[in-house]
Amino acid sequence: MSDRNRPAARAQTTLAGLAVALVLVTAVTVGGVVAADRALADAAGESLEQHRAERAADALVTESPLVSSDNGTAAEAIDLALANDTNAAELAAAVPSLRGVAFRVRVDDRTIAERGDPSGGHTVSRGALAVSRRSVGGTVDLSEETTTTLDGRTNSVRLDVNPGANTTIRTIRVDDRVVLHRPTGIEGERVVEVSSRSNPVIRVETAESDPSGSVDASATAFDSTVVRIEVTVDA
């Protein structure tokens, strides 16, 4: 072989060796998880399927692709939009107990992910807080009113402030808290953080007694409910 071809040959050999190494590492990792789970299951007097289903169920409701902390609540919760978009490969990659086994994950009797045929496996379930999202909005027409209420709990509100001619909008409150204030006038788009404990009430204060213009408010509202997560694992 010529000297010119030796670097290419060495590169191909290196790539081939790397591919083999990755396969071996993956096999060892999956095998190690199975061995550890089997030992823990034996120590607890559980079947391997039960142990892995229990671990998977705990992970799915605490730290998984189904869970979101940006949900208008004070704690993490199952995001139903994320649950609708997930698949078996994504869940198996995130939850070690679901790797290398047949499994099914259901939310309130609806299958969201399945791999293989887990019909002979063990099933466990967990209750969890879940949230769904929807768009809400309202408008304050300053020629008629000074308040509007958004229909749904949220953690931020987008305000589009459009004062009329000869109108100065000085203060905007959400519930009893001042979120915007400027003595010389507020206008344009703003995003403000709000409490998520109740439906936000937007109040507009102007310098004039006969104002005109409008304030449009929009937000993503979070509706919460309790759901049941069901995990079946056939190892």
Image (spheres, rainbow, N blue to C red):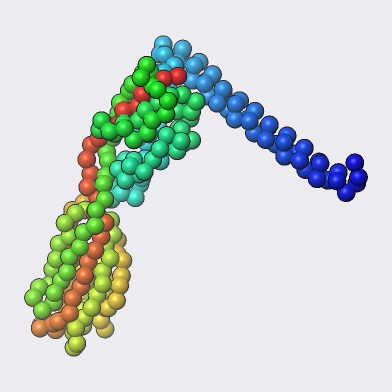
Lateral position of residue 48 relative to residue 175, left or right: right
Most distant residue in the front direction: 1
> Is 227 left, or right, of 232 in this rendering?
left
* Whether residue 150 can be seen here: yes
| Nearer to me, 129 or 119 | 119
Q: Residue at x 35, y 30 (%)?
A: 105
The residue positioned 34% from the left and 35% from the top of the image is 112
List the single residue furthest toward the bottom. 166
Which picture quadrant has residue 151? bottom left
Instruction: Look at the image and tell me in which quarter the N terminus lies.
Output: top right
Residue visible at 21% across and 81% down in the picture: 163
16 sits left or right of 196 in the view: right
Q: Is residue 182 visible?
A: no
Q: Nearer the viewer, residue 40 or 11?
A: 11
In this view, 120 is above or below 64: above
Image spot of residue 155 (x, y percent): 28, 56
Name the foreground residue: 80 vs 180: 80
Is the residue 131 above or below the residue 231 in the image? below
**Quadrant hosting residue 177:** bottom left
Residue 128 pos. (x, y %): 28, 35
**Which of the two residues, 92 or 223, is positioned nearer the viewer here?**
92
Q: Which quadrant holds the C terminus?
A: top left
Extreme residue toward the left, this view: 144
At horizontal 18% and vertical 76% (from top left) the residue drawn is 214
Query: Residue 142 location, x and y as percent?
Result: 13, 77
Q: In the picture, residue 194 is in which quadrant?
A: bottom left
The number of callouts visible is 0
